[in-house]
Amino acid sequence: MQRAAWFGLALVCTLAIASASASAPSLQALIDATPRGATLRLAPGVYAGPATIRVPMVVEGDHQAVILGNGRGTVLSVEAHDVTLRGLRLQGSGDSHDGVDAGLLLQGNGHVVEDNDFEDVLFGIHLKAVNRARVLGNRVTGKDLFMGLRGDAIRLWNSHDNRVEDNSFVRARDITLANSPYNRIVGNRFTDGRYGMHLIFSPHLHIEGNTLTHTGTGIVGLYSADLTIRNNHIAHALTDGGAGIVVKESPGSRVEYNQILHCGVGLKADASLDAGNALVVRGNQFAHNIIALFFYGEVGGHQFIANRFDSNLTTVAVSAPGVASANQWQDNMWDEYQGFDRNHDGVGDTAHELFLFADRIWMETPMATFFRNSPALEMLDFLERLAPFSSPYRLLRDPAPRMH
């Protein structure tokens, strides 16, 4: 009954969009009448889509021109180079994931997409083999669908040397970059999504100053070398994996000066046997996470320098003993450090060492995770620390911990 009502509502909305679109002037006719390289300034009103731009031009709407799709396919497509779209409102894409129905589909090079509004679209902006484009200051609100039925807020496929800056994304699935190296993703805001950013086979990305909140996971980098993830604010990533940042097989990457708050896991990283896959993790704040750092795989070798760990339920967890034993720790600030600074130089007099006692039970046996921080396990951990009946495993040693 509920599913039937949902489909009925979708049918009504589609018919309403189709009716409104049919009564509006055709945008395609205006585009076809615009000379190559000229500017099309749309008067306030509603224009019927879908439409396709096939020659270089500028289209401006002053925020009062609405391009209304018919509820099928993509609202506006670009099949040329050097097209500028500014001040438009695009609404009413289709709902096909196979067709990648979007508010805007870009192909070609050198585009500028600036200060536009996208509403009621499955995918927001789709860059398909696009290079040297600028996507600046747009606002994308996806269709009101369950998470698994949504499309990406912005999707880059086989695209490089693009700038995606100062955009606002709400109620979408992911920001996705696939096979798209050398792009800048800077100053964007994304809330209510699955993955804040999903990076696949996309090396040499610069990701800085973004705010990602209330997503299942913040940033996921897979098989993407030389990532720079810097000065981002990632908060409330608690579902669908629940990690602020996940990095796998991405050698030469740097995770620096990020603020990672209230996530299931702050940073989740593989610990490969290959030393070339090591990360540099510097100057980050990990606070109020269930687990601040989680390592899986083999030995590791990541560098952790000048990070701050505050009020995390568990600071470091591993998938098995020996994982991450080769990580390097220096000048980090630990809220659980129990040493002193008698010479007042801002550095602890003794090294900070973290050992696994009874907590290794839930780390090594996933089914026991349910009992993590339970009174019984806490008592067992206390007794293990008081009188160890087996040698504890040392997770890390920071020889020069910074004081608060």
Image (tube, helix red, strand yellow):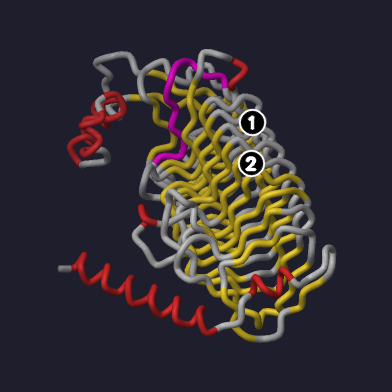
Which region of the structure is painted magenta?
291-301
Mark nearer the N terminus (2 vs 1) = 2
Q: Residue at x 42, y 41 (%)?
A: 265
- Report helix, strand or loop for mark 2: strand
Q: Does residue 295 show up magenta in the picture?
A: yes
- Residue 159 in sight: yes
Q: Quadrant of the N terminus?
A: bottom left
Residue pictured at 68% horizontal, 65% vertical: 137
Residue farthest to the right, as pictured: 37
Whether pointer 2 and pointer 1 mark residues with C-beta atoms closer than 8 Å, the reply is yes
Give the quadrant of residue 48: bottom right
Residue at position x 46%, y 64% from top? Answer: 72
Residue holding disc 1: 253
Tell me where residue 276 appears, x and y as whole percent.
62, 17
Residue 273 is situated, as x and y percent measured from the top left of the image, at 51, 13
In three-dimensional space, the C-alpha distance between marks 2 and 1, rounded to whole angstroms, equals: 8 Å
From what the image shows, is residue 379 above or below residue 207? Answer: above
> Which residue of the protein is positioned furthest toward the left in this rendering?
1
Q: Position of residue 311 (x, y in %)?
A: 44, 47
| Position of 390 relative to 246 (above/below) | above
Q: Which residue is mark 2?
A: 229
